[in-house]
Image: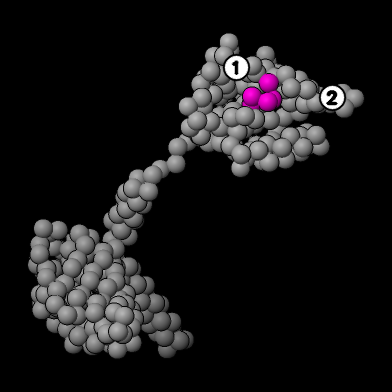
Amino acid sequence: MDSFSNTQQTSRAGLWEWPDITKKEMWWSDSLFDFFGYTAKKITPDIKNFLRNVHPDDKKTWEDAVARSREVEDQLTCELQFKNKDGVYRPFTILMKALSRNKGKIRLSGSIQPMERKPTEKEFIRQTEEMLLKAQNTAMIGFWEYDLRSHEITWSKQSYLNFGLSPDTNITTYDEVVKLIHPDYIDYHNQVTEYMIYSGQCEFEYLIVTPSGEKRGIWGVGELLKNEEGEPIKLFGILQNVTERKKREDQLKDQEFLLDEVGRLAKIGG
């Protein structure tokens, strides 16, 4: 059975051939019998038993693929759910191709490949959180919350790192945050907080001073959350360390200033 050998990309693929689609007889490889949970002695390899294992909702997909194979030369792909002898359905990728068309007699051959199992909801959430954490670490983006009723502050690990603090540090009050703000920006920070409560959203950027004395640029966005009665209950948002970006911007400004000065002096000299 070498007529569809290109489909044998992996030992997990099951092969099949339907010599004449107007008749019921088929040929199945041992792997295909295994997928269905039967041995060659327990089930006859024909189209009737083949379709008996296809999920009812997917039978039209199979019929459409077979109909298309009458018209196209290319290999076709579709996805079907097959059940084993225990009645459990699993998703498979089906490859098929018409190998010959002789006086209306169409010979189909193909493979069945188990699809990778989709993650459960918990697995998907965990994987998403891991990818989000990697993105946060790469972009140095942290999250923050400010409870307007209890006045309690909550920071993510990256927020602490952005402020030059150990993630084990416990910042819980607004006043503790203010102590980290550069003195020139404390009034601005307080105004931003008030404006955020008033407008519902605000973007901000200021300087902080880390415990080691380093000045850092912090950019952030905050939003207001209200309860069902329309009362403000929480501010939340993100914080990003933009120190390196600010340094590059300052360097560009210095370069532009120097170029302007050179141009001005050149005009005076001329």
Left or right of 91 in this view: 50: right
| Residue 207: percent from left, percent from top | 21, 76
- Along the polypeptide, which appears first: circle 1 or circle 2? 1
Residue 138 seen: no
| Disc 2: which residue | 105
**Residue, x 16% and y 72% (percent of image)?**
153
**83 lies above or below 230:** above
* 177 sits left or right of 254 in the view: left
The magenta segment? 46-50
- Label 1 to label 2, Cα distance in Å? 25 Å
- Tell me, for residue 85, which label it has, or none: none
At horizontal 70% and vertical 33% (from top left) the residue drawn is: 75
Secondary structure of residue under mark 1: loop
Judged left or right of residue 202, residue 96 is right
Q: Amino acid at mark 2?
A: Lys
Identify the disc placed on residue 43.
1
Q: Image check: 154 left or right of 270?
A: left
Number of numbered tags placed on the structure image: 2
Camera-nearest residue between 211 and 263:
211
Q: 234 or 179: which is nearer to us?
A: 234
Residue 174 image point, x, y percent? 13, 77
Amino acid type shown at disc 1: Ile
Q: Quadrant of the N terminus?
A: top right
Q: Is residue 90 above or below residue 216?
A: above
